[in-house]
Image (cartoon, grey):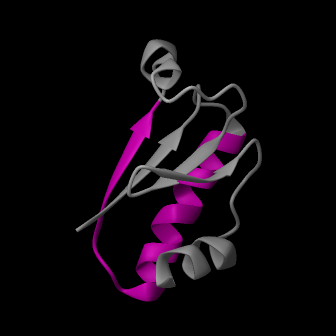
Amino acid sequence: MRQIKVLGPGGPKCKTTYNNVLEALKQLDIQAEVVKIEDIEEMMKYNVLTTPVLMIDDVIKVKGRIAQVSEIIELLKN
């Protein structure tokens, strides 16, 4: 099962990215473990300075901006 992480302090951009991930999974009809990381110390382990961050299978795919549903779908297809 794929693992998707959304890193961010919980602001509107982070929430939108998280919701976009859920929508992309729904549209593709696939299962994935979706983890939301809001703890600053936990985020520091990933060495990211700008949020939100979208990680798929522990690889950073998007950072510092909202990942759109269509973009997430393309990332999950590859």
- Judge whether residue 69 is colored magenta: no
Residue 59 horizontal/vertical position (percent): 49, 53
Residue at 42% from the left image edge and 79% from the top image edge: 26
The number of callouts visible is 0
- Judge whether residue 25 is colored magenta: yes
Residue at 51% from the left image edge and 63% from the top image edge: 21
In front of the other: 28 or 19: 28
Along the horizontal axis of the image, is 11 left or right of 21? right
> Looking at the image, is 30 positioned above or below residue 17?
below
Q: Quadrant of residue 52?
A: top right
Part of the protein shown in magenta = 13-37
Residue at 42% from the left image edge and 20% from the top image edge: 42
Along the horizontal axis of the image, is 37 left or right of 17? left
Quadrant location, the N terminus: bottom left
Residue 40 horizontal/vertical position (percent): 52, 16
Residue 15 horizontal/vertical position (percent): 59, 44
Residue at 72% from the left image edge and 31% from the top image edge: 50
Residue 34 horizontal/vertical position (percent): 35, 54
Q: Quadrant of residue 64?
A: top right
The single residue placed furthest to the left in the displayed view is 1
In front of the other: 22 or 61: 61
In front of the other: 41 or 68: 41
The single residue placed furthest to the top in the displayed view is 41
Along the horizontal axis of the image, is 24 left or right of 52? left
Q: Main secondary structure of the magenta part?
A: helix
